Every structure is written in C-alpha cells, then in structure tokens.
Amino acid sequence: MDEIVIRTAGKNQVVNITEEVQRIVEKEMKRKEMKEGICLVYVPHATAALTINENWDPSVCDDFMAALAELIPKGKWRHDKVDGNGDAHVKAAIIGPSVTIPIKDGRLLLGTWQGIMLCEFDGPRERNVIVVCR
Amino acid sequence: MDEIVIRTAGKNQVVNITEEVQRIVEKEMKRKEMKEGICLVYVPHATAALTINENWDPSVCDDFMAALAELIPKGKWRHDKVDGNGDAHVKAAIIGPSVTIPIKDGRLLLGTWQGIMLCEFDGPRERNVIVVCR
Amino acid sequence: MDEIVIRTAGKNQVVNITEEVQRIVEKEMKRKEMKEGICLVYVPHATAALTINENWDPSVCDDFMAALAELIPKGKWRHDKVDGNGDAHVKAAIIGPSVTIPIKDGRLLLGTWQGIMLCEFDGPRERNVIVVCR
C-alpha cells in the first residue's frame, strides 16, 4: 500500500496523477513478482474525488468541472450553514472516491486517452491518494 | 463473503452502514490472517446504490438526495408506465451499486469524515449489502 | 484477463454485456479452481462507460441516456472545438469506466434485475471490455 500526497492550488481543480500511480504500480508489481492484477486508487476525503478522463486536451477537465458547477451550484445547500462547502460534498458523493484499473504486464491497462484525475472540490488543500495493487 | 440486511424506512433514504461493514472487515481479515487488502461493498438491487459521504453532519446526505431529486425528477420517465420508479433506476445507475475501500491494519482505510452510505431510491424495502474482502 | 470486443451501432447506445462477462467469469473461475472473488469489468476508452442497471425493461436504459442527454447537452463544451464530442467525455467521466461485482459459486453475484451495461456516448465505434477475476 502506497500513498501520494498532492497539494491542490485552487478551490476547484483537476490534477492528473497518472504518472505517480503508474510508478507505484510498476514498483509494487515488481516487488510482488506479479504481472497481472487490479489497482485501487482511493482518496480518504469527503470533498475530493477520483475519475478517469482524457489526458491530452486539458479543456476536457475544464468541461467536466464546468458541468458539475452548473448541475450542483454553490450556495444552496443545508450543509452550507456548517461549512460553506455543501456543493463540494454532493459532487464528491456523485463522482466517488475511487477508481479501479486492471494491471497487465506490470502496468496500468489504461486506454491511450485515459488519465487518472484527482478532483478537488474544496481546495486548496493537501490530499492523500492511496494506491493498492492486488 | 458476508451479507448485511437493511430494512429501509422511506421512499428515499440514506443509511449509514459504516459500522456494520467495519465489523465484517475486522472479522474477515482476522479469519484470513491478513492485514492489507481491499473491501468491495455491493448492493444487488437496481433501485438502490452505495456512496461514500460525510458521516457527521446528516444534512450532507439530505443535500445529496435533494440534488439527485432535482436533477432526476420523478414522473417523466418511460419506465414509469411499468413500475412508476423510473427516477429510482436512473439515480441508481448514476451513483452505482458498489464502493471499494482499501483495508490497512485489518480495518477500512476511510478518511475521518467518510462513511459508507446505502442510498434507497425506491423504498421502503429490504436491501442486502454484500461485503467481500480480498 | 480476458477481453470482449463490442461494435456499437449508434452515437449513443446501451449494450447489455452481462452474458459475455458471465461466460468469462465462469471459465476463469473454473481455470483458477476458485469459487469466490471479485470481477472488475473495465473499458479503456474516454467516451464510453460501464454501469449496472435493470436488464428486463429496455426503457430503463433509454431513460438513463435521456437523463444524461438533458443534464449534459451536446454542443456547449470547450473540447467541442477539438473533437465535437465534449458531452461524451463529461458523461463518461461521471458514469466511470468500470464496475466491480462479487463472484459467488463461480458466478457473478448480480441481483435478479441487474445487468452490466456498456454505455456508448460517441459511437458507432469498436469498444474493448476488459474482464479481470481476482
């Protein structure tokens, strides 16, 4: 089990963490002398999430965040009275805190256009990302 | 493989099942003499779902259900002619029937504010929750 | 690790792949001489997704696609200037590229009404579906 620490920069931000996860998977699978398996990537946070999305044109991630901001607007939630971040919790619960990816030949079996994206909905904060290979 | 049975009380309801899942994980990991792994929690139902969300302020779960009710309103779906619960199916398909969580030191590696939430979209019903540790 | 190839027919389409996945799971579990486990189903594509939804009334899948089309309308995304499929990327990122299902007695532990659905958001295309049993 490994951990990546990411310092996010904005209130809402998408961070491509594919290379960091890939490095951990390669190291772990070598250590375990395994070629095939599955990789669970997990954020132990209630206002961040993980998704898989195109890794080449950054406007895809902007579109994703813009869509969520429109569907789950800021400032109309009951939890806002406590923390002011009700929208961040709803977004995180819809997108979810994990992605699971097959491992083949000791590497993540991502498609050509797929990247692993940490979604920050209430930053800037320090976020932990847990990586488990089985 | 273990199973939890939950009797939901309302048409739409969020039930915090974290403690029940945690107990199963601790027992299973002890039995297997394992410390690390992953836990799959799964509902075999098409009008319920699982998510991970804040476990302290209950208004976070109210906000989540209110957001879904606004995005996927009741009464405008083709399936309503069959069962009257078209909205419940769409919500369940978007949120999804499972969550997967790392296990460390024989326990779920949830964040401080994370709880496992059974989402009932067409209750009241009896719901089964499957827990698998690998 | 096995792969299913699906040729989708429309721009937006839901394809029930439950039987194909079930066949692979039964074969794999027999080969591994295992009865219990988990099955990861994964699409290595950035404009397709996987979900679990009712397998009997096809209007449930029509409702699901109609809801997404209304929430994430076509033609208003920054990525449209590159590829014209910005909506497909946002939908795929929200629904996600994988489902994970328990395996019991060498078979998928799906509920009576649950089917595994490949969601095409930018077809027609050839899509690969990866199936891993652990």
Image (cartoon, coloured by chain):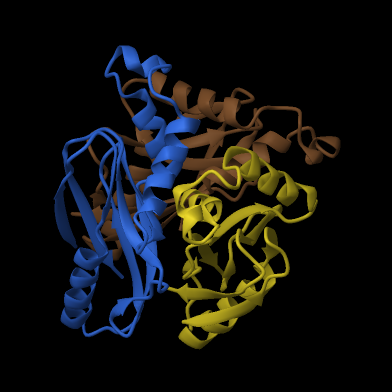
Chain colours: A brown, B yellow, C blue
| Most distant residue in the right direction | A81
B46 and A32: which one is in front? B46
Q: Position of residue A110 (x, y in %)?
A: 27, 43
Residue A115 located left or right of residue B116? left
In the displayed structure, B116 sits above or below C127; it is below
Q: How many marks?
A: 0
Q: Position of residue C131 (x, y in %)?
A: 24, 61
Q: Is residue A79 left or right of residue B28?
A: right
| Occupied quadrant, residue A111 | top left
Judge whether B46 appears above or below A50 on screen. below
Q: Quadrant of the N terminus of chain C?
A: bottom left
Q: Is residue A16 visible?
A: no
Q: In which quadrant of the rendered view does residue A104 lie?
A: bottom left
Residue that protrudes farthest toward the top in the picture: C81
Residue A130 percent coordinates (x, y): 50, 51
Task: Tell me which residue sits at (51%, 54%) in the image.
Answer: B80
- Residue at 64%, 44% (x, y): give it: B69
Closer to us: B57 or B15: B15
Q: Is residue C21 visible?
A: yes
In the image, residue B11 above or below residue C31: above
Q: Quadrant of the C terminus of chain C?
A: bottom left
Residue B59 point in image, percent of width and height: 79, 48
Q: Residue at x 50, y 32 (%)?
A: C71
In the image: residue C121, left or right of residue A124: left
- Look at 37% across and 60% down and name the residue there: C57
Judged left or right of residue A72, residue A95 is left
